[in-house]
Image: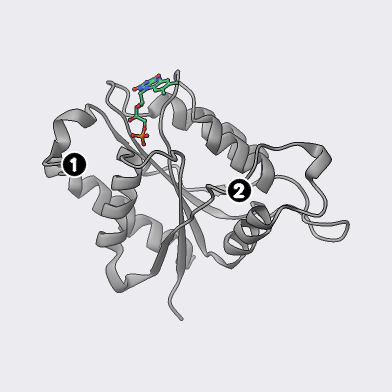
Amino acid sequence: MAKKILAVVGSLREGSFNRMLAMKAKELVGDEAEFEILDYSGVPLLNQDIEFPAPEAVATAREKIKEADGIWIFCPEYNHFFSGVLKNFLDWMSRPVSNTEGQVMNGKKIAISGISPGMSGTALAQDHLVTLLAFLNADIMNMPRLTIPHAMGLIKDGKLELGESEKYLLRQKDAFLKFIEE
Ligand code: FNR
């Protein structure tokens, strides 16, 4: 049966570079696996007063995480950290589903990529993200991770053209497909 990859883009903005990168990854994955970009725009700010029963958007996202063989996170960099929306999302996912069911990130296989206009290509944000994911006991593919700097220079007619960097995304895709097979 085809493996399922769920992409989580840490930016809600329409023209997000990280969303464009996720779309490129989807193109490269082709029919080698199912690839869905999660819409979690309806997940509210975490407030323990509304934790149980879980809001519908949270419950739906948890189901999709549970069904996925791998989660591919596309991580923007905000102030050398990952974005607040991604932190909020992962905080929700880090909470137990019920009294009898634990949190859904436990043991999940994860790939991390990111693109930014700056020089770091999201490397600093990714390191922080790894710290959080390790705490959730996720199974992180640390090699390769992908960092793409200078995003502005890669936008042609409103589209992301990776050029030379595309081979690194291809390499990461191949590695992740192998990682989720193991
Ligand atoms: C940024 N940006 C940014 N870029 C970077 O390379 N290093 C950084 O530390 C920051 N810090 C930062 C803070 C805040 C609050 C914002 C809003 C932005 C720029 C950021 O990387 C850029 O807007 C990206 O385009 C965001 O990713 P998406 O939305 O294109 O996926």
- Image height check: is 55 above or below 10? below
Q: Amino acid at mark 1?
A: Ser
Count of numbered circles on the image: 2
Q: Earlier in the sequence, mark 1 or mark 2?
A: 2
* Residue 173, x across and y down, in percent: 32, 56
Q: Residue furthest right?
A: 99
Residue identified by numbered label 2: 138
User: Going by the image, does 49 lie left or right of 112?
Assistant: right
Residue behind mark 1 = 165
13 in relation to 171, above or below: above
Question: Colour scheme used in the picture?
Answer: one colour
| SS type, badge 1 | helix
Residue 182 % position (x, y): 49, 65
Q: Which disc, if any, is residue 26?
A: none
Dot 2: element: loop
Quadrant observed for ligand 1 in the rendered image:
top left
Is 155 located above or below residue 152 in the figure? below
For the residue pair 15 and 23, the one nearer the viewer reads as 15
Q: Of 175 and 50, which appears nearest the observer?
A: 50
Question: How far apart in space, not on screen, are marks 1 and 2 (Cα)?
Answer: 27 Å
